[in-house]
Image: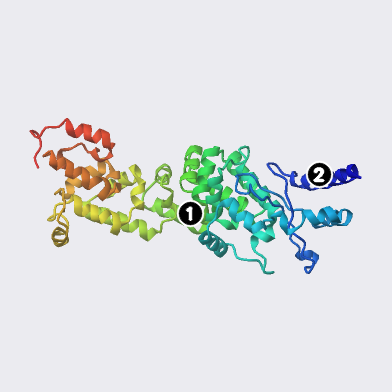
Amino acid sequence: MFCWALSLLSSVLLLVVGYACASPRLSTSFITPINHSLQKSELQYRGTSSSEDHVPNECLVDIPFEKRKQIETRHPVIAKHIFSSEAKIRPTEEWFYAYLGMTSTEQKRFHKKLPDSNNGKSTIQRLGRHRLHEWFAFFLNDKTVGLSHKQLRKMVLSRPQLLSYKLSNIQATTTFFREELGLSSKDFISMLQSYPSVLMYSIDNRLRPTVEFLQNTVQCTDQRVKRICTSYPNVFSHSLDKTFLPKLAFLKELGLNRSEVSQVVKFAPTLWLSEKNLSSKLDFLSKSLGMKTFELRTVVLTYPQILGLSVENNVTPKMHFFLDPEEYDGESIAALQNEESNFVNCGLTKSELKDFVLYQPALLAYSLEGRLKPRITRMRDYNISFLYSPRNIMSYTDEKFEAWLSSQTSSWSIV
């Protein structure tokens, strides 16, 4: 009798474990108690673990209704213990939150982005643990994507809608980026971390046409296309017909040939910033520094990122910082001097600042408070004028700047 009972118990446990092990990296699971007041379609049977659900990759699977019913019919005594509330069963949602380490605040944000389905069930309940396990396993497996648990958590919290997408679609998109576009594992993971929505776009209607536009129409090299896709993955969020092609025509109207357009598109936002936005920045540089058309052309081709700087919040304060008050806006500078006791001004003419910008357009992109002001102040402490410093002095690393500074004398410099 004892042997018979032991054999029976072993058979049932093997049956349960067999379903739990159908997917990789799974551990033995138990099932939530049956609620006989629910209809068959409403029953939720979820695998669980009482202690190790928080461990990365320890995902568990659902048990089909028919299989559980079979266990209850053939072995009611054993099933009563397996499916009892004392088995420390964890519902799928509870397991899901614990697995990703979601706080109550994060759970609320999550559900705002991924609301309940029409029948009142949460999306996590509807998806089920088996499907979520397969989804997680795909992203965590080094042979497919290779995210860390922390990276997976960030991606899910950022774009929970991805959980509703078919895994087959996500697999196809991954294949497109890894094999067709040739992204490395590191670049693909970087893309997913910064813009996970890229997995939600159609390959034939959005992803492939965008890549082909960059390759064939703009004539970007394969390496540049990869760099654009990894640095600016939101490039895929814009329409080819409504945004890219009209912008390409606008750039050509500015006198840029095809190879120059390819150079400018290194800064991909050029393709989706409005024409008004781009024109206003070019006009500002022209008026503020007295730049001619060919000089503007040089600046844009050398450092297209300058077109992404805000005129009001970025470029204008730096003009105030570099230019002599008489060269720019005397009243604004005077007001600024009265407001700031530590006001610093380089006192350059427009022509002098233009020479600096033509030599290194990135000068206008450096942080005013983080780099420009501190370095000018340090140079003044050494009685050195910015006007007579190397044109690329602001591009020096902090170590190189300090080394240069300590090697100077004040005999050649006029403040």
Q: Residue at x 30, y 48 (%)?
A: 365
Using the image as rendered, state which of residue 130 and residue 216 is in the foreground. Answer: 130
Q: Nearer the viewer, residue 85 or 139?
A: 85
Where residue 148 is drawn, which disc sits there? none
Q: In the rendered image, which residue does mark 2 sit on?
A: 14
SS label for mark 2: helix
Q: Residue furthest front?
A: 2
Residue 181's place in the image compared with 319, above or below, is: above
**Crowdedness of circle 2 by 10 Å Cα count: few (<14), some, many (20+)?**
few
Left/right of residue 29 with respect to residue 12 in the rendered view: left
User: Foreground mark, 2 or 1?
Assistant: 2
Q: Hey, what amino acid is under mark 1?
A: Phe
Given the image, on which type of amino acid does mark 2 rest?
A: Leu
Query: Along the polypeptide, which appears first: circle 2 or circle 1?
Result: 2
Q: Position of residue 277 (x, y in %)?
A: 36, 59
Residue 378, percent across and down?
17, 41
Residue found farthest to the top? 407
Which residue in the protein does label 1 denote?
Answer: 244
Q: Quadrant of residue 159?
A: bottom right
Dividing the picture into quadrants, the one containing residue 118 is bottom right
Q: CA distance from mark 2 to mark 1?
A: 59 Å
Query: Can residue 371 be spotted in the picture?
Result: yes
Give the vertical position of 297 relative to 77 (above or below): above
Can residue 183 be spotted in the picture? no
Question: Residues at badges 2 and 1 in contact (C-beta under 8 Å)?
Answer: no
Q: Where is residue 40? Give x, y as percent.
A: 80, 64
